[in-house]
Image (tube, coloured by chain):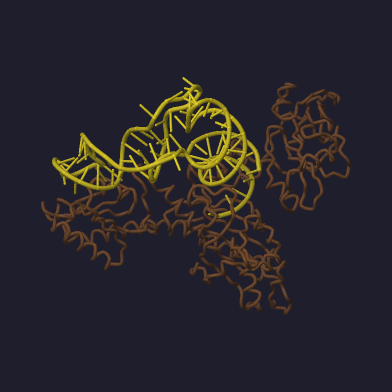
Amino acid sequence: MDRVAGNEFFFPALIPHELLEESGRDKVDVLFTAKPHDYFLGFTHEEVITDVVRNTIKSYKQLPFLGYQIQTKFRNEPRPRGGLIRGREFLMLDAYTFDRTEEDALVAYKKVRESFGRMFTRCGLASIAIQADSGAIGGSLSEEFMVLSEDGEDTVLRCSVTGYAANAERCEAIPVPAEPADTEVPAMEEVSTPGVKTIDVVSGFLKVDATRLIKTLVFVAPDGSPVVALVRGDRELNEAKLGRTLGGPARLAEPAVVERVTGAPVGFAGPVGLPASVRIIADREVATVRDGVVGANKADAHFQHVLPGRDFPEPEYLDLRTAVAGDQSPIDASGVLYTQRGIEVGHVFYLGTKYSSSMRAEYDDVDGTAKFFEMGCYGLGVSRTFAAAIEQHHDADGIVWPITIAPYAVTIILVNPADPAQTEAAETLYSDLLAAGLDVLLDDRIERPGVKFKDGDLIGVPVKVTVGKGVADGGTLEIGLRRDRNSKQAVPIADASAHVLGLVKQLKDEIQANVDTHVV
RNA sequence: CGGGGUGUGGCUCAGCUUGGUAGAGCGCACGGUUCGGGUCCGUGAGGUCGGAGGUUCAAAUCCUCUCACCCCGACCA
């Protein structure tokens, strides 16, 4: 962060109620409130730094500005899980940029994005930046840093040709035609479907492939008006995409609203004969359904042989469905999407003036006029990064810490603490390495050797030194790397310290080489 | 909030279906043995079976209610 001219802060974890009222985020549901006063426990700090900046930065001459901090965040997650992966309290590096223009803001965005990439690489992690949804934070451009791991909780869609990667909720879904355009479609006809409500059941009951059903979902837009959304029966409507077209999160309408809008109980909604006042939007694939089945907007009935545009007005066609593995790549027509699992360790956003305008954070520009700051915000999950590092670096015996984030660089296992020669060799090396600035763990417990070896592997310190019978035999210690059991070799006691320092340097150099060549 | 699951010595769990004297492994204590990849043998301590109510001669076991935790989903660094 300092490399990209960041200014380190340490904001209060308690955020005054008024500040979140300004941005409207006092309604965010993960907030913890702090009594007796009207405070929230900090879940992210856009409002706080915006308040600081609007009070201190008055001129374009003070821009660009980057502030960051590393602090405990509090979010009342509905479902904490996976230990450090997702907790109600976690450590986060959060950064915020303030600029004059959108171009400057995007330059800042790029800088922080690269900085994040370097940090993950420096932590020994292989990460990728993917196209993402900006969610509750808001803003228009956003990418997530994912650490690929089989145990990850996120699904990443990737293009087989270009390597392009996107979060499933963001990835454009290329339409696959349901039926040939020249199909003859008989006249629409009502069929009785008593108690037949779900796609699966309708499909089975009418012996019609799910690709020919048009799923009709009623949502309530942010402004309170009902919106009818259509997707093909075998597809999943993507609420993030829907929210983007409606300008805010939409929620599925409750049964009473569905009945009021469609005149039918849930399960029989369809686009035919809806009031003209109701906005209807559809996934692009729906346009290719030529002999479809839809709810008849009355109980226990559906229409078959439905043709969009003939039997109901052409809706607005948009990308609304969730992309899936096997879809054509949106980047390269010859590519196919496939999925990978990942852990989200960082997220970067270009915000525009979302917060500066709602909080009236302005500076005087070159021409003397007051303008809102162009902002970006950036989050790096520190505690989660450690969890991701363990996911990416472990074996059957335990953790294999990357040297850069290992709690200790070296562990010295003193096999027999009752042997004065071994003890002296171990303690001498221990103090030499400490003097050289390394973090060293000396296991001089009175335990059987096997126990100490197992514990040492479990903890995963990258460089292992065994002080044992080699001391008496030939005046040697065994030195090796945790990641490779075959790497150990006998080293004369006099050379041990230098040898360890050499290995530590080698491990650090390997990671640095990755950082130097890393391109996000 | 919806779906599923689990609560039994310090820890991990078996026992519950088909009610009948609470078990194992690990850990702990003691004795011996072993001593470079979680030694082996023996002895021992330790639990009102998450809580409340009910059924029954008898409840860890069956029924009702309740609490807690875990997993899957909505959400997110």
Query: What color is chain B drawn in?
Result: yellow
Dividing the picture into quarters, in which one does residue A441 lie?
bottom left
Looking at the picture, how far across and down is residue A49, in whole percent? 61, 70
Dividing the picture into quarters, in which one does residue B26 lie?
top left
Q: Is residue A306 left or right of residue B63?
A: right
Q: Is residue A276 left or right of residue A24?
A: right
Vertically, is A435 above or below A394? below
Comparing A417 with A490, the one in front is A417
- Name which residue lies at 61% across and 77% down: A62
Question: Is residue A340 visible to the viewer in this orientation of the structure?
Answer: no
Residue occupying the far left of the picture: A473
Q: Is residue A122 left or right of residue A166?
A: left
Vertically, is A236 above or below A90? above
- The chain letter corresponding to brown is A
Vertically, is A153 above or below A178? below
Q: Is residue A52 left or right of residue A318?
A: left
Vertically, is A495 above or below A222? below
- Name which residue lies at 71% across and 51% down: A249
Looking at the picture, how far across and down is residue B66, in whole percent? 60, 43
Comparing A483 with A325, the one in front is A483
- Name which residue lies at 69% across and 27% down: A200
Question: Is residue A384 visible to the viewer in this orientation of the structure?
Answer: yes
